[in-house]
Image (spheres, rainbow, N blue to C red):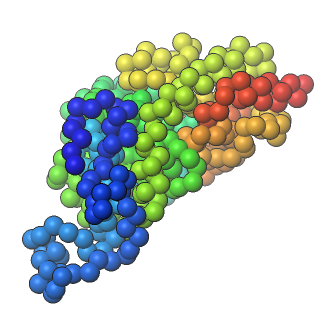
Amino acid sequence: MSHGKNLQFDSKCVHAGIGDYEFGPVVPPIYQTSTFRFKDSAHGAALFKGEVDGYIYTRMKNPTIKALENAMAELEGGHKALGCASGMSAVSTTLIALLKSGDHIVCSKSVYGPTNTFINTILSKFGVEATFVDSEFAEEVEKAMKPNTKVVYVETPGNPTMSITDLEAVSKIAHKNGALVVVDNTFMSPALQQPFVFGVDIVLHSMTKFLNGHADVVGGVVVVKDEEMYLKMRKVLNQHGGVIDPFNSFLVHRGLKTLSIRMQRHCENTLPIAEYLEKHPKVKWVRFPGLKSHPQYEIGLKQHKGHGGMISFELNGGYKAGEILMNSVRFCQLAVSLGGVETLIQHPASMTHLTMGEEARKAAGITEGLIRLSVGIENVKDILADLEQALAKIS
Ligand SMILES: *Cc1c(COP(=O)(O)O)cnc(C)c1O
């Protein structure tokens, strides 16, 4: 069944990736099997040689996973996608595929903590050199480029500082120098930002967050622009082994159907909360792409279809005050992760970004008092009331 590429985005969310299956189900069945029977030995041999299309073994290909991959390729406007066991599997598969010993990577300073740690502790072991830059200043990316730079890795908005990188400018710089641009699009999802439009080469996600949206799956995805890159990535994923499983694929695919309306609600809820916090006398600063005070507000307007559901802020009382806030919320939940239907609050310096180390956090602008809020899709009045009562506990 073909749904056409010219549907509106919210219609695509409902229909993308759904094919024809035996008995005509309207959603892809869960093919919960590790392996697939061959018709005879010649069929098995032909499948392995790639002479016929079909399924062999779930680490290589599975119809339920394929359905989700097709959906993600369509939603991002890419060629094909690869379903990964986690966002970190998407990050590691991509970087292992693109880099070899002696290569150099330029990476945003403000990235997901374990991405920074992967580059610094694992890629470095294999002789890959890295430079971390404030990628919101395109000239910093340009300055960091070297003859052996193969990858420019950008997270925008950056986790957790919410810094916004101009994807068009950075893509031009990277391409001029013969490097590829990889974007972690987890914070926005394709509902709000489609990086391929701005010339980037690879888009990846933690599907654990907005894409699945229900805080019950860990998963990741890499979306590529052409067949050559797809085959290269697929080979690495096959051997690296971090593939998503059929049941989690089914759940994420189900989550995608409501992506558009969930993102709309996340956006509607988050702006008034950011404005409330910015005006609050106990709040020192707030970073949210929808506030005019955001240093890259204009780039955000160019790049985003909405401002998203993530806020970072710091209280006047720093970490001590933040601790009281986190321990006093009753409706918002004190937990890491983000992008789910429920509002979550956490402290990056002692939690998600602990392994980066104090020095790297400082360089990235992740202050010790920074609090990250992932605004859910509940009624905004309940979220505001909870923040109000918790802020009142701070003297
Ligand atoms: C959570 C997250 C990741 C890692 O994803 P997992 O699914 O937890 O492995 C990568 N990038 C960003 C921006 C994230 O928020």
Residue 298 vs residue 14, the one in the foreground:
14
Whole-percent x and y of residue 90? Answer: 40, 54
Front residue of 193/292: it is 193
Q: Image point 17% across, 76% down: which residue?
A: 48
Residue drawn at (38%, 23%) of the image: 303
Residue 354: give x, y in percent of width and height: 64, 49
Count up the numbered dots. 0
Expressed as whole percent of the image width and height from the top left, the position of residue 369 reads: 72, 33
In the figure, 281 relative to 69: above or below?
Answer: above
Identify the residue shown where x is 42% and y is 42%. Answer: 257
- Residue 304, quarter of picture: top left
Q: Seen in the image, is 158 located left or right of residue 169?
A: right
- Quadrant assignment, res 349: top right
Q: Is residue 99 visible?
A: no
Against 172, residue 335 (above or below) is below
Please say whether residue 253 is visible from this viewpoint.
yes
In the rendering, at what x and y percent does residue 320 appear?
A: 82, 35
Image quadrant holding the C terminus, namely top right
